[in-house]
Image: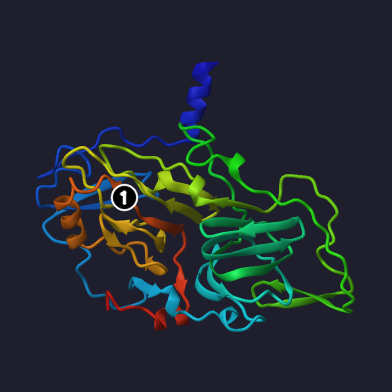
Amino acid sequence: MLLLLIEADLRESPMESFVHLRKGTTPRRVHADLDGLKDDELGRGGFTGRTANMYRRNDPTAYRAEGPLRPVDVLGALLQPTDASDAAGDPLLLFSNADCRIRLSRRTAEMPFHVRYVDGDLLCFVHAGSGQLETEFGPLDYREGDWLYLPKATTWRQLPAAETTLLMIEATDEFRVPSPGPLGRHFPFDPSLVVIPEPAPIDDDGRENYEVRLIHDGGPTTLHYQHHPIDVEGWRGDNFPFSFNIADYNVVTSDSVHLPPTVHLFMEATGVYVMNFLPKPAEQVAGTERTPWYHRNVDFDEIAFFHGGSLYGVPMPPGLISHAPQGVHHGAPEKARERARRKFDDYDRVDWQVIAIDTRRRLIPSPEVLAADLGQHA
């Protein structure tokens, strides 16, 4: 019976080659002991499939780009969502493809209406601010560093206590927790630490009209109710909103190698993968590269949203949004790598806080994003 199960598993899961070739000059260890060479990974499946590590003489990100696959970097503080100045305004679309839309919100005033995102699940990261989401499942308080999950077509309204910046990821499929791997169900995060709302129906306040905006492709559509839409006395089931703070995320680390982004996976939907890069002990084995290697992640576009922190004493720009199209080299500049090597004995932690979004399909930057590009690769 065991042999039959093993054979069935092998038929369903193609095995990667166990033999990895070496040609020319290569270091003995992966991502370590480079001796002046530049480590460049050409990897399939987001670093989980077949890979080739090439050791170059020169920095592969030292280029000037022309055309639509040019990497883009924008400062979120310079972007102007209409909800920042108008209570009836909307978040700003940043990037989109067939699987997701990524938006930025900077709301200061309570929504004068309720909303439903009806094209897919919504996952929001609280970059700054505090307040409450008034949902039909009950109120959900939020603070800086929270992830807020809202199932598709949930009715809700935002009531900020302080100006709130949200990075909003709408997937056209369901967001779900990644399948447990060898570390088990409580790593990298313990799902029992999520906060789930309790129902709290709201009485009508005498209005003749309660507005619910449906946010969808080709919309919006507005529904007008004669009663308050938050009227749920109770609920049961396994489809509900929740919050989870990154302070409760368990970071997986290694002393001898800088681990790939896949170990930081938080939530996923079809074609969309969301990760938390958070403070952790720095690698301690001498010669280990502490900075992510150069790569072109050929199967995914990458978005990095810089929440805060520093990299070996150099502050990271809060609110910077970086887009690296698949197939195009990216990574920390060579000066940052050289500094990390020089300061190896000065720092024993990495204090970065970066939210990463990888997408299977190419992301299209909005005109507002392209207009605000810092031009680092132009």
Q: Quadrant of residue 116?
A: bottom right
Secondary structure of the residue carrying tag 1 is: strand
Which image quarter is the C terminus in? bottom left
Point 61% across, 59% down: residue: 142
Category of crowding for the residue at label 1, using alpha-carbon neighbours closer than 10 angstroms: few (below 14), some (14–19), many (at least 20): many
Q: Is residue 203 left or right of residue 102?
A: right
**Image vertical order of residue 139 relative to residue 11, above or below:** below
Point 69% across, 75% down: residue: 111
Which residue carries the number 1 mark? 350
Q: Nearer the viewer, residue 269 or 89?
A: 89
Q: How is the image coloured?
A: rainbow
Looking at the picture, how far across and down is residue 198, in whole percent? 75, 51
Is residue 200 in view from this perspective?
yes
Which image quarter is the N terminus in? top right
Q: Is residue 330 left or right of residue 187?
A: left
Is residue 299 in view from this perspective?
no
Q: Is residue 97 left or right of residue 216?
A: left
Q: Nearer the viewer, residue 327 or 198?
A: 198
Point 48% across, 35% down: residue: 181
Looking at the picture, how far across and down is residue 159, in whole percent? 67, 69
Q: Is residue 265 left or right of residue 377?
A: right
Looking at the picture, how far across and down is residue 188, in whole percent? 47, 41
Q: How many marks?
A: 1
**Image vertical order of residue 273 relative to residue 3, above or below:** below
Q: Which amino acid type corresponds to the residue marked 1 in the rendered image?
A: Val
- Outermost residue, front direction? 161
Looking at the picture, how far across and down is residue 119, in whole percent? 66, 65
